[in-house]
């Protein structure tokens, strides 16, 4: 029996930065099945082979271990909810996600930046997973940026790059943390604002923010960028991310404010007030967009338009 701590090993594996895929197939009775995975790799160009690794814990494991055809869909920036659906949703996943069928009747996820339709080349048992090798029969590619994943969190290369290239003196990174139908805010002498930090290392903004919040007793899953803007007057660059609390917060410095009450609060700056008012509106449908601009004006980009 191995003496290696599986939880520590999983965390170490998670330090490898990857993209996110959704692997799809059909069960023996024709029911579409799918799961989210970052265990994806190219294997060979001649013949064209790739591999994914379904886990034996999947309810659809037998379908993938014995399938004759499957597809791999590489998710785009902004498709976090697609990934979440195929990671944890227990109902009809395909009813929640736009898709079409390839020539083999396998679901293809709309909006993915690359889509590979495969026949099963080989299926090999490998511990608590299997290695499913597919021969690519057809594929598409859009060239758009992909959704990133590391350390159990999503990230956006496009937004991170924009933050790194900014030349303002100060960078502030914050999180709009949703907890059920509330948002966690901190109160300052100037008004409410999302919890935030000042980060000297812009390449580590997300990581430093997560460390700060964890030190304050806040467990969360940091998701996509929501608002990135500059305040030229103060020489400050701001980047706020969406986040979901993964447990009830016991932090005394934050207040859980009902989303429906956000518009009526007094905030620390007009830019924060506008951001929170937009969040309150978009939270009604879950259609969160990305704001890019300055403290006064900018553009709101739906997730499908992110670059």
Image (cartoon, grey):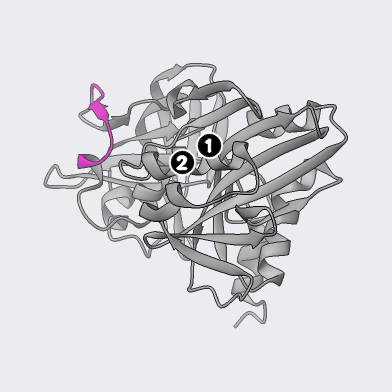
Could you tell me residue 287's position as x and y percent? 37, 36
Disc number placed over residue 247 in the picture, else none? none
Q: Residue at x 42, y 29 (%)?
A: 135
Quarter that holds the N terminus: bottom right
Q: Is residue 200 visible?
A: yes
Position of 19 relative to 103 (above/below):
below
Q: Quadrant of residue 2?
A: bottom right
Query: Horizontally, is 217 left or right of 246 in the view?
Result: right
Q: Which residues are magenta?
A: 95-103
Q: Are marks 2 and 1 in contact (CB under 8 Å)?
A: yes
Query: Tag 1, which secondary structure?
Result: helix
Q: Pinpoint residue 249: horizontal percent, then vertical percent.
A: 53, 73
Q: Is residue 260 left or right of residue 155?
A: left
Closer to the camera, 65 or 81? Answer: 81
Q: Which mark is residue 277?
A: 2
Determine the residue positioned at 56% across, 33% down: 42
Q: On the image, numbered disc 1 is attached to which residue? A: 274
Horizontal relation, residue 299 to residue 213: left or right: left
How would you rate the neighbour count of disc 1 (Cα within 10 Å): few for under 14, some for 14-19, many for 20 or more?
A: some
Write down the quadrant of residue 4 in the picture: bottom right
How far apart are the alpha carbons under marks 2 and 1? 5 Å
Q: Is residue 185 above or below residue 273?
A: below
Q: Is residue 111 left or right of residue 177?
A: left
Secondary structure under the numbered disc 2 in the rendered image = helix
Q: Is residue 98 magenta?
A: yes
């Amino acid at each position: 029996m191995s003496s290696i701590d599986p939880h520590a090993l999983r965390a170490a594996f998670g330090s490898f930065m990857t993209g996110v895929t959704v692997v799809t197939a059909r069960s023996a009775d024709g029911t579409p099945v799918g799961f989210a995975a970052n265990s994806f790799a190219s294997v060979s160009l001649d013949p064209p082979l790739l591999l994914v690794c379904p886990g034996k814990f999947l309810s659809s494991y037998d379908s993938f271990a014995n399938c004759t055809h499957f597809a791999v869909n590489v998710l785009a920036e902004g498709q976090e909810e697609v990934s979440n659906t195929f990671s944890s949703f227990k109902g009809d996943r395909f009813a929640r996600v736009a898709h079409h069928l390839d020539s083999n009747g396998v679901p293809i996820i709309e909006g993915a930046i690359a889509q590979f339709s495969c026949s099963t080349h080989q299926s090999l048992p490998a511990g608590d997973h299997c290695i499913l090798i597919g021969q690519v029969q057809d594929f598409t590619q859009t060239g758009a940026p992909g959704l990133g994943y590391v350390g159990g969190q999503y990230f956006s290369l496009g937004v991170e790059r924009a933050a790194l290239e900014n030349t303002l003196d100060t960078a502030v990174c914050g999180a709009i943390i949703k907890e059920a139908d509330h948002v966690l805010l901190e109160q300052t002498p100037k008004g409410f604002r999302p919890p935030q930090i000042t980060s000297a290392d812009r390449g580590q903004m997300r990581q430093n923010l997560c460390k700060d919040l964890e030190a304050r007793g806040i467990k969360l899953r940091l998701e996509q960028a929501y608002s990135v803007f500059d305040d030229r007057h103060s020489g400050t660059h701001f980047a706020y991310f969406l986040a979901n609390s993964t447990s009830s917060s016991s932090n005394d410095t934050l207040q859980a404010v009902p989303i429906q009450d956000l518009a009526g609060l007094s905030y620390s700056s007009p830019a924060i007030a506008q951001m929170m008012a937009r969040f309150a509106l978009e939270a009604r449908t879950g259609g969160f967009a990305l704001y890019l601009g300055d403290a006064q004006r900018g553009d709101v980009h739906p997730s499908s338009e992110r670059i």
